[in-house]
Amino acid sequence: MAKFEEVYEDTLRLFNTHIGDSSIPSFLRVKILSNEGLKDTPGKVSKAQDIVKFMTNYDIIIQVNEPIFDQLSDTQKDYIIKDLLAQVHYDMDKDKVNILKPDVTTFSGVLRQHDIDTYLGIKETISSLLEEKKIQEDLAKQAAKVVKA
């Protein structure tokens, strides 16, 4: 069972500074908790369940393995915090909080052989090719309708 604790003031202050600098709207309430049970990840971001939001008024809950987090350099801490906060997205049109998945998912061995720009370029090329294919399919469907008529 996970053991939750309040984070130290230094950790809370660091998170709050980054939250203030982020695109997260100020009316969203974020709770930072220490959870030593996190093993494979430096932190975890989740949207508060309705009952938790009702009882606590928090919208987002961020868990961090604080004993591990405290041993990181300042640069590494900044990176982890920014990475966690990047998952939080607020859709103004729908008035809804979303937790996003990372947009980069690859193997570290492949990334070591190439650079991130190569990876992103390939993803962009594939997206363009898929969009082009969809346009061609839509045109073919329209042409088939015209022939039938």
Image: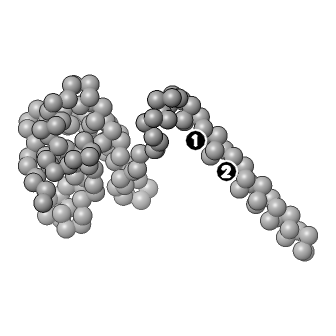
Return the residue at label 1: 123
Query: In terms of image quadrants, where is residue 75?
Result: top left
Q: Is residue 119 above or below residue 94?
A: above
Query: In terms of image quadrants, where is residue 108?
Result: top left
| Mark 1 to mark 2 CA distance (whole Å) | 11 Å
Going by the numbered disc 2, the residue's amino acid type is Leu
Q: Which element carries disc 1, helix, strand or loop?
A: helix
Going by the numbered disc 1, the residue's amino acid type is Lys
Residue 27 seen in the current view = no
Q: Residue at x 12, y 38 (%)?
A: 67
Q: Which element carries disc 2, helix, strand or loop?
A: helix
Residue 107 seen in the current view = yes
Q: How far across and down, in percent of the image, does residue 27 sit?
A: 26, 48
Quadrant of the image for the C terminus? bottom right
Q: Residue at x 46, y 29 (%)?
A: 112
Q: Nearer the viewer, residue 50 or 132?
A: 132
Q: Nearer the viewer, residue 93 or 127?
A: 127
Q: How far across and down, in percent of the image, does residue 97 sit?
A: 34, 55
Q: Is residue 36 above or below residue 73?
A: below
Quadrant of the image for the N terminus? bottom left
Q: How far across and down, in percent of the image, does residue 131 sit?
A: 68, 50
Return the residue at label 2: 130
Dot 1 surroundings within 10 Å: few (below 14), some, or many (20 or more)? Answer: some
83 left or right of 142 in image = left
Count of numbered badges drawn on the protein: 2
Q: How far across and down, in percent of the image, does residue 80 sit?
A: 28, 36
123 left or right of 40 in image = right
Q: Residue at x 82, y 61 (%)?
A: 140
